[in-house]
Image: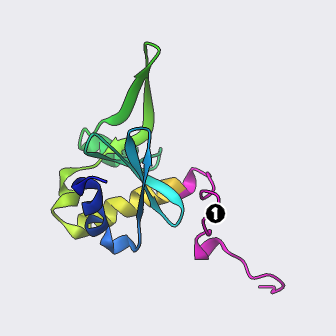
Amino acid sequence: MSAFVQSLHEVFEGMGRIQARRMFGGHGIYHEGRMFALVVRETLYLKADAQTAGFFDALDLPAFSYERQGRITAMSYRQAPADVFEDRSEAALWGRRAWEAALRSGKPPKPGRAAPPSSRQSAGRST
């Protein structure tokens, strides 16, 4: 794992525990079993959706894209602003936005990972 990927534990310390997992020549960055960021070629991309796209657009931050079979595909991850590496409050803000976009995506946590405590319900108890 590169020093850049390892440094993300400090960058996003305000979120709590994060994990980096190797994937497709890069790393997925996870919090509570959900991927909220992607690192490819030492560049950090954060999960984006319709609710957060405007924040990325305002800073002209591009989407991660790749080419396969002559076709370019843009993903729902946008380049992180440089401020996240310099300011922990900015890192927490952008990390939270990416995390919330991951939650809205509706994709469940990876198998074998616990669901976030806020989504767990107590068995046998009515509210």
Q: Nearer the viewer, residue 59 or 70?
A: 70
- Residue drawn at point x = 56 percent, y = 54 percent: 104
Q: Dot 1, crowdedness within 10 Å: few (<14), some or many (≥20)? A: few
Say if 93 sits above or below 73 in the image: below
Horizontal side of residue 107 vs 52, given as left or right: right
From the top left corner, tell me how far across and down residue 74 is, in percent: 42, 30
Q: In the figure, is residue 75 to the left or right of 82?
A: right
Residue 90 lies within the magenta run: no
Residue sticking out furthest to the left: 86
Q: Under tag 1, what secondary structure?
A: loop
Residue 94 relative to residue 121: left or right: left
- Name the residue: 64% across, 58% down: 111
Q: Nearer the viewer, residue 20 or 31?
A: 20
Question: Quick one: which residue is furthest to the front in this view?
Answer: 1
Prevalent SS, magenta region: loop
Closest to the observer, 71 or 27: 27
Residue on which the image places disc 1: 112
**Residue pictured at 38% horizontal, 71% vertical:** 15
On whether residue 109 falls in the magenta region, the answer is yes
Quarter of the view holding residue 122:
bottom right
Extent of the magenta region: 103-127
**Which quadrant is home to the C terminus?**
bottom right
The image position of residue 24, as x and y in percent, is 44, 38
Q: Amino acid at mark 1?
A: Gly
Quadrant where the image shows the N terminus: bottom left
